[in-house]
Image: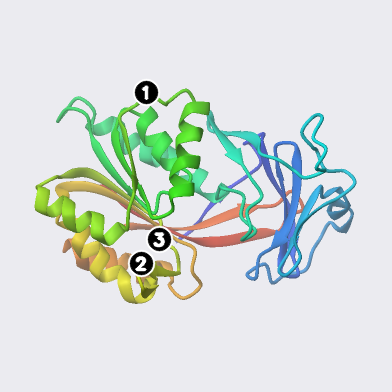
Amino acid sequence: MPPNRGRAEWTDYALLDAGDGRRLERFGVQVVDRPLPTATGVRRDWASWRSATVRFDAGRGWQATAGAILEPDDPSDEVGPWPVVIEGLQMELRLTDSGGLGIYPEQRLNIGWLERQIAARTGVTGQPAVLNLFAHTGLLTLAAARAGASVAHVDASKGAVEWARRNATLSGLGDRSIRWLVDDAAGFVARERRRGRRYDGLVLDPPSFGRAGRRQWKLADELPGLLAACRAVLAEDAFVLLTAHTTGLGGSDLADALREAFDDDEPPTVDRLALDAESGVGLELGWSVRRPG
């Protein structure tokens, strides 16, 4: 299972270096230094770390450096939202309290595959319907909508859904067929089954841990049941894109869960989500499992 690697051809993004539990990335005008526990190697380009414009540390939050790019005439000296373009889609980035920015750059590796799956179905059965669960700020939703699909974008965070809608507007896709839904993934799928809805494709990027109402949610425990529920609202030949960033599940675990849920004879395609740094360091960020349908 060779890594699915992303390099620096996306001009608004570059992984500059990683190691010692941190990663250094350029997102448009900002160079971001933030933690990554799986970056266990040694940094190779120490000089590049001096170019960081913002840095995140647990307990201290975000700190802007002297080189931070601020909004014009902003008296707060805080780094405000800024845009990046990925595969022709404009995304708004923000410094969040958790250390995130509103984008997972490794997901760009799945955009082409997703668009090809939709293109293969467009016009055959009408407009393909895609269900995107844990849809975050909408990168894959926008890719699917741009390719011609109607999309149900589902996330439990109202803020994330509003952020995704802003990204749709920024990308010129605000008028596309997208349902913006603030909802629990499992609860939404159960209601869709009762409504008799069916989808031609599923995009699933669940967190490692979370909450479902008052109940703790752990991907390793919940994934088989969630996949089984999703199958009930999918067409027989539906494609599935399952990605996970947890260290508790390997690619073979995800593939086994997907194959069992769909009772497939053929195994899905499994790739590592990985990025190559300009310094030569390789960074592994999870797994991508694809059922072409």
Picture coordinates of residue 235, whole percent (x, y): 14, 47
Above or below for 120 versus 172:
below
Question: Label 1 amino acid?
Answer: Asp
As shown in the figure, which amino acid type bears the numbered disc 3? Pro
User: Which one is in front in this view, the residue at disc 3 or the one at disc 1?
Assistant: 1
Question: Which mark is drawn over residue 206?
Answer: 3
Q: Earlier in the sequence, mark 2 or mark 1?
A: 1
Name which residue lies at 69% across and 72% down.
40
Q: Residue at x 23, y 34 (%)?
A: 128
Q: Quadrant of the N terminus?
A: bottom left
Q: Is residue 267 above or below residue 68?
A: below
Q: Which residue is mark 1?
A: 175
Q: Secondary structure at mark 2?
A: helix
Provide the secondary structure element on which disc 3 rests.
loop
Residue beneath disc 2: 254
Residue 56 locus on image (x, y percent):
73, 59
Q: Nearer the viewer, residue 89 or 101?
A: 101
Residue in the image at 65% along x and 70% along y:
37
**In the rendering, at what x and y percent does residue 92 appear?**
59, 37
Type of amino acid at the residue the image marks with label 2 = Leu
